[in-house]
Image: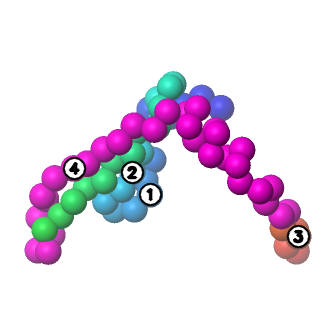
């Protein structure tokens, strides 16, 4: 699957971008009145995400719904 160039929404104040070597997570911080305060971002290399996924136990398969 190819990386998307479009922002992938998580919530109204959180989204991410997919790049070839990392995932860029973005979080918009707002004041109590809803006005913009700042935007934080962090890069997470894909290799770290894959390493974390390998540590997770396999997920149980769900029964098909009718």
* Cβ atoms at labels 2 and 4 below 8 Å apart: no
- Helix, strand or loop status at disc 4: strand
In the rendered image, residue 43, in percent from the top left (x then y), is placed at 39, 37
- Helix, strand or loop status at disc 1: loop
User: Does the magenta-highlighted stretch encompass residue 60?
Assistant: yes
The image quadrant of residue 46 is top right
Cα gap from disc 4 to disc 1, whole angstroms: 15 Å
Q: Residue at x 36, y 56 (%)?
A: 14
From the viewer's perspective, tell me whether residue 31 is left or right of residue 59: left
The image quadrant of residue 56 is bottom right
Q: Earlier in the sequence, mark 4 or mark 3?
A: 4
Q: Which residue is mark 2?
A: 15
Say the numbered circle drawn on residue 39.
Answer: 4
* Cβ atoms at labels 2 and 1 below 8 Å apart: yes
In this view, the mark in front (2 or 4): 4
Q: Is residue 23 above or below residue 2?
A: below
Q: Earlier in the sequence, mark 3 or mark 1?
A: 1
Residue 19 or residue 12, whichever sits in front: 19
Cα gap from disc 2 to disc 4, whole angstroms: 11 Å
Q: Which quadrant is home to the C terminus?
A: bottom right
* Cβ atoms at labels 2 and 3 below 8 Å apart: no
Q: Is residue 54 above or below residue 45?
A: below
Q: Which residue is mark 1?
A: 10
Q: Earlier in the sequence, mark 2 or mark 1?
A: 1
The range drawn in magenta is: 32-61
Q: Residue at x 77, y 56 (%)?
A: 57
Q: Earlier in the sequence, mark 2 or mark 4?
A: 2
Q: Is residue 33 above or below residue 9?
A: below
Q: Which residue is mark 3?
A: 63
């Amino acid at each position: 699957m190819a990386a998307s160039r479009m922002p992938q929404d998580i919530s109204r104040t959180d989204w991410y971008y997919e790049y070839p070597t990392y995932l860029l997570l973005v979080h918009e911080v707002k004041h109590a009145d809803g006005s913009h305060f700042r935007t934080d971002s962090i890069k997470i290399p894909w290799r770290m995400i894959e390493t974390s996924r390998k540590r997770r136990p396999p997920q149980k398969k769900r029964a098909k719904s009718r």
